[in-house]
Image: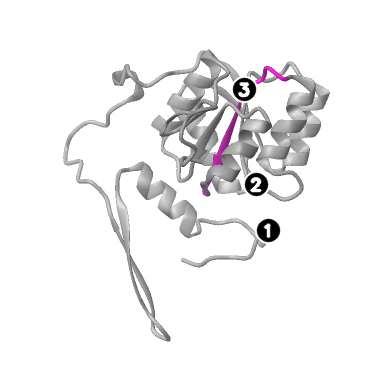
Amino acid sequence: MKTRAARAGYGLGLYIAQALVAAHRGHIDVDSTPAEGSAFTVYLPYAGDAPEESLDSQPTVPRGAGQRVMVVEDEEALLELTMDALRALGYEPVGFDSSMAALQAFRAEPQRFDLVLTDQTMPDLSGVDLAREIHRVRPELPVVLMSGYSGAQLTERARAAGVTALLRKPLVRRDIAEALGRALRRPQYSTSTGTLSPTADNRAG
């Protein structure tokens, strides 16, 4: 597996591989020797002959009711994974691999979407900037931000832009389900590790 320069093509890189393994409750060990190479060992739970557990058998997982979700992610593989997860949860995802294209589509039909799920780090407009522009038109629209980074600075910027929830990458389907369920119920800023209020601890981000 290799890393790549930004915008230098798409593929299953280290980050996406980690997200896939984490989603299946596994982990990756790396053994690397200079000038010799690297070995990646993937560990996944043994399922045996047990039937796959469906979302329908997990009543605690919030499900959508056909709400249309704008998904903005410039990594094509991650965009497809996220949209697949949303479909399985009962939402209708509409994907964009460009924040500018997403903003243009939103401005053309502001009432088309029930929620926006966007990555933070993207060319042109960041997720926070996109949220700010969207809220100039529809201040009440829930925006859920995804980011691989954390910290009080991002939390405060997201709050100032009207972001409803902040999710840490890599994501698992349950995190998405719970964040969207909360966001559609109330416009309160929260993270995947808890709810933030103006007086709350801002260590999560």
Q: Which residue is drawn at the image coordinates 77% and 31% (left, top)?
A: 133
- From the viewer's side, name the closer residue of 135 and 72: 135
Q: Is residue 142 left or right of residue 194?
A: right
Mark 1 crowdedness (10 Å alpha carbons): few <14, some 14-19, many ≥20: few
The first of marks 1 and 2 along the sequence is 1
Task: Look at the image and give the residue range highlighted in magenta.
Answer: 139-148
Q: Is residue 69 magenta?
A: no
Given the image, on which type of amino acid does mark 1 rest?
Arg
Q: Residue furthest bottom?
A: 35
Task: Look at the image and say whether residue 145 sits in the magenta stretch.
Answer: yes
Say which residue appears at 46% left-offset and 42% top-offset. 203
| Residue highlighted by disc 3 | 142
Count of picture labels: 3
Q: Disc 1 on helix, strand or loop?
A: loop
Q: Is residue 22 above or below residue 61?
A: below
Inspect this view and state whether residue 124 appears.
Answer: yes
Q: Position of residue 43 (x, y in %)?
A: 26, 55
Residue at image mark 2: 74
Q: Quadrant of residue 137?
A: top right
Amino acid marked by disc 2:
Asp
Report helix, strand or loop for mark 3.
Answer: loop
Q: Are marks 1 and 2 in contact (CB under 8 Å)?
A: yes
Which of pointers 3 and 2 lies earlier in the amino acid sequence? 2
Residue holding disc 1: 7
Q: Is 153 on the left or on the right of 1, as rendered?
A: right
Can you tell which quarter of the image residue 29 is in?
Answer: bottom left
Q: Residue placed at 36% from the left, 46% from the top?
A: 22
- Answer with mark 1 or mark 3, whichever residue precedes in sequence: 1
Residue located at (62% from left, 43% from top): 120
Q: CA distance from mark 3 to mark 2?
A: 20 Å
